[in-house]
Amino acid sequence: MGMEIEYREIEGHEGYRFGSDGSVGIRWGGARGRRAGVLGAEWRPAKIHVCNGYLRLCLRGAGIQRVNRLVCLAFHGEPPTPRHEAAHLNGDPADNSAANLAWETRKENETDKNRHGTRLRGERHKMAKLTEADVCGVRAAPRFHGSGLAHAKRLGVSPGAISDILAGKRWRMDNRNRGLPPVGQPKKERETCQHQ
C-alpha cells in the first residue's frame, strides 16, 4: 500500500494545488470545452513543461514558475530570504516531492550539486569546447613563448582560455577530484597527468 498524497494550496494562487509527491492539480477551465477563465469543480493534472531538466508550470497571473519552488512553498512555507532556492536534496530535478525539497542558499545548493555529482563542470557542461584530455595535454605540454596561442588555435578556443587553464582559473576542481597533480606544482610533476 503506497503512501497517501497530501495536497496543499498556496495563498494567492487560487485554482492550483500541490501534492506531497510533487504533483500539481488545476481547476481552471480550458479542458473539454470549459471556458479558460472559469474555475471548475474537479481537479485535473496541470500541464507541466520540462526545461533543462526542471519541471515548470505556467501559473495563472504569475507566469512560468518552477514546480520545485511552488511545492517547497506549499509544504515548507516562505523562503527565509528572497534569494533562497528550492533545492533538490537528492540531485534529481524531476523529483519534486516535498520530502526531497528544502530552502537553501545558492552556496548550499551548489555544495549539494558537488556532493551528489549533478553539477555540470568541465566537459559535462553543454557549452564545453574542451575535453579533460585536451586540458591535461595543455597542462602537460612544455611551455615556451607562443605555446598558449598554438594550443588555442589547435583547440579552437581563445588564448585567454588557455592562460586561465594554466593559471588554475578554469578546470581547477577536476584535478583535485581525479587525483591529478595541482596546477601550481613544478612542470615535471604536472607531466604525470593521466586519464582514468
Image (cartoon, grey):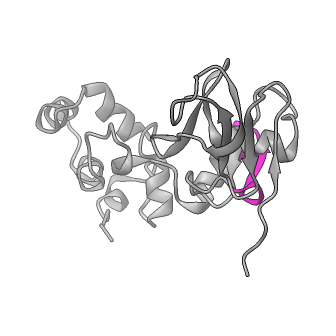
Q: Which residue is at 43% across, 60% downward? A: 181
Instruction: Find residue 19 and report its horizontal and vertical position in percent.
Output: 74, 52
Instruction: Find residue 58 and report its horizontal and vertical position in percent.
Output: 57, 28
Q: Which residue is at 64% across, 41% downward? A: 67
Instruction: Find residue 65 and report its horizontal and vertical position in percent.
Output: 62, 30
In the picture provided, is 133 more to the left or to the right than 125?
A: left
Residue 91 drawn above or below residue 1: above
Query: Observer-nearest residue: 123 or 95?
Result: 95
Instruction: Find residue 89 and report its horizontal and vertical position in percent.
Output: 69, 57
Q: Which residue is at 70% across, 38% downward? A: 69
Q: Identify the image quadrant of the N terminus.
A: bottom right
How many numbered dots are placed on residues in this image?
0
Magenta span of residues: 97-108
Query: Observer-nearest residue: 57 or 122?
Result: 57
Q: Quadrant of residue 115?
A: bottom right
Q: Quadrant of residue 129?
A: top left
Residue 60 drawn above or below residue 150: above
Q: Identify the image quadrant of the C terminus.
A: bottom left
Residue 107 shows in this picture: no
In the picture provided, is 123 more to the left or to the right than 30?
A: left
Query: Observer-nearest residue: 74 or 184?
Result: 74
Reply yes or no: does residue 45 show up in magenta: no
Residue 65 shows in this picture: yes
In the picture provided, is 159 more to the left or to the right than 101?
A: left
In the displayed orientation, state which residue is furthest to the bottom: 1
